[in-house]
Image (cartoon, grey):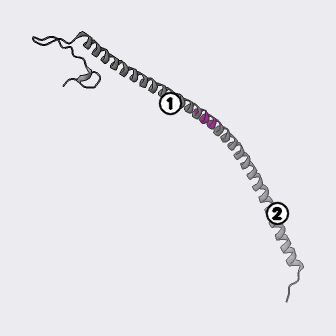
Amino acid sequence: KINYPDGSGPSSCVFLNVGVAGSQPVSEKQSAAELDLVLQRHQNLQEKLAEEMLGLARSLKTNTLAAQSVIKKDNQTLSHSLKMADQNLEKLKTESERLEQHTQKSVNWLLWAMLIIVCFIFISMILFIRIMPKLK
C-alpha cells in the first residue's frame, strides 16, 4: 500500500516517467506544471492548518485568561470570607463571655429575689392565720 503525503490518491502526486526502453519521456513543461500544482496544494493545506492552529491557540489563550481571572476572583472572595469568619468567631467568643457573665448575674439576683418573695409570703401566711379567727 502506498501512503501519499496529502492523504489523497495517486492523482495528486507527481511521478516522473523516466524513459524505459520503448516509452516516451513526459514533457518538462507538463511535469513542471504538475509539480507546481502539487506544491501549491501542499502550501494551501499548510496555510489552512497554520491558520487553524493559530485560531486554536488564540482560543486557548482566551479561555486560559478567563479561567485565570475567575480563579483570582474566587481566591479573593475566599480570603475575604476567611477574614470575615475569623472576625465573627472573635466577636462570638466575646459576646458568649458577656452573655455568660450576664446570665450568672441575672440568676444570682433572680435567686435572691425569689427567696425574699417566698419568705415574705411565708411570714404573711403565718400572720394571716394568727390574726384571723377560726370559723365555726
From what the image shows, is residue 72 above or below residue 134? above
Q: Is residue 129 left or right of residue 90?
A: right
Q: Residue at x 26, y 11 (%)?
A: 29
In this view, the residue in front, 115 or 42, is: 42
Label 1 sits on residue: 63
Q: Main secondary structure of the magenta part?
A: helix
Q: Residue furthest left?
A: 21
**What residue do we see at 61% from left, 32% from top?**
76
The magenta segment is 75-83
Which quadrant does the C terminus fall into?
bottom right
Real-space Cα distance between discs 1 and 2? 77 Å
| Residue positioned most to the right | 131
Q: Is residue 61 above or below residue 24?
A: below
Q: Residues within 10 Å of mark 1 (few under 14, many from 20)?
A: few
Labelled pair 1, 2 in contact (Cβ < 8 Å): no
Which of the pair 62/113 is nearer the observer?
62
Q: Judging from the image, what secondary structure is the residue with disc 1 in?
A: helix
The percent position of residue 94, horizontal first and vertical second, equals 71, 42
The answer, for residue 112, to whether it is visible in the render is: yes
How many numbered marks have been drawn onto this rendered protein structure?
A: 2
- Given the image, on which type of amino acid does mark 1 rest? Asn
Q: Earlier in the sequence, mark 1 or mark 2?
A: 1
Callout 2, which amino acid? Ile
Residue located at (89% from left, 78% from top): 131
Image spot of residue 111 (x, y percent): 77, 59
Based on the picture, tell me whether residue 82 belongs to the magenta stretch.
Answer: yes
x and y, in percent, of residue 19 in the image: 15, 10
SS at mark 2 in the image: helix
Residue 4 visible in the picture: no
Which residue carries the number 2 mark? 116
